[in-house]
Image (spheres, rainbow, N blue to C red):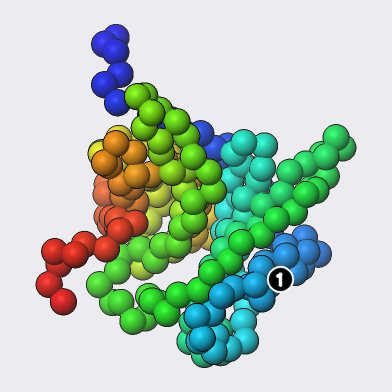
Amino acid sequence: MAPEPRFVIRFAAEPPQEGLPYGRWAEQLQAEFLAACLRIDSEGEDLGDPGEVTWFPDRTYGGRTYVPATARTSAGFELFGHVSFARDEDGEPAGFDAAADFTGETAEANPDWAIDLSDDVIGSWRGEHGAAAAMTLVWGVPLVRDGAIATAELADLAVDQCTLLEGRFTLLAPDDYRGDTLDVKLFDVRGREIAHESLYEDDDEPE
């Protein structure tokens, strides 16, 4: 086998280990997430009151489990972020932390989107010759039918994948590495690509 031409971390996170949060567990995570929402710098915007929280599949990396979330507000904004935790010696969740932000860019206002994505950088990975990748949590919902598996690709190299759970997915992958940035692709059950989105806006696209 020939040497790997692109030396970069791949499939670093554990696949989802549990179903989507519900019951008392969802209530505990929601309290952490909404507390983080209260700390958001709204930049002078009236964000309104948060509505129902939508949870996404968990991913575990570096000893912490990340559970992403989104929530629409009464003012039409979307809150997005994640709750993370470690596990104590008995395997119980401990050391909770949460992060949140907001956006006015919603799927309804962007009918050209094929996948509604949110993302947050949670760490870094050092590669060759001092290059560093931004380890990025990406979660989303397909806006097209028949999606089964989502992948994260860096210069056409698959670096993570996730089977959709109740129509949602979470990826954890290296981004912004050696000039390459992440693309998220959606495949059907037969492995055919049916949609893709970049994490970055294409400034060359006509308005």
Residue drawn at x 30%, y 46% is 181
Decide if residue 26 is in sight here.
Answer: no
- In x, y percent, where is residue 98? 66, 60
- Residue sitting farthest toward the top: 1
Whether residue 127 sits left or right of residue 82 in the image: it is left
Residue drawn at x 41%, y 62% is 117
> Quarter-wise, where is residue 86 in the image?
top right
Q: Nearer the viewer, residue 190 or 134?
A: 134
Whether residue 43 sits left or right of residue 18 in the image: it is left
Whether residue 151 sits left or right of residue 59 in the image: it is left
| Quadrant placement of the N terminus | top left
- In x, y percent, where is residue 76? 48, 87
- In x, y percent, where is residue 143? 36, 68
Residue drawn at x 50%, y 80% is 43
Whether residue 98 sits left or right of residue 197 in the image: it is right
Kind of residue indicated by mark 1: Ala
Residue drawn at x 35%, y 63% is 115
- In x, y percent, where is residue 6? 29, 26
Q: Nearer the viewer, residue 186 or 182?
A: 182
Location of mark 1 (residue): 35
Mark 1, secondary structure of its residue: helix
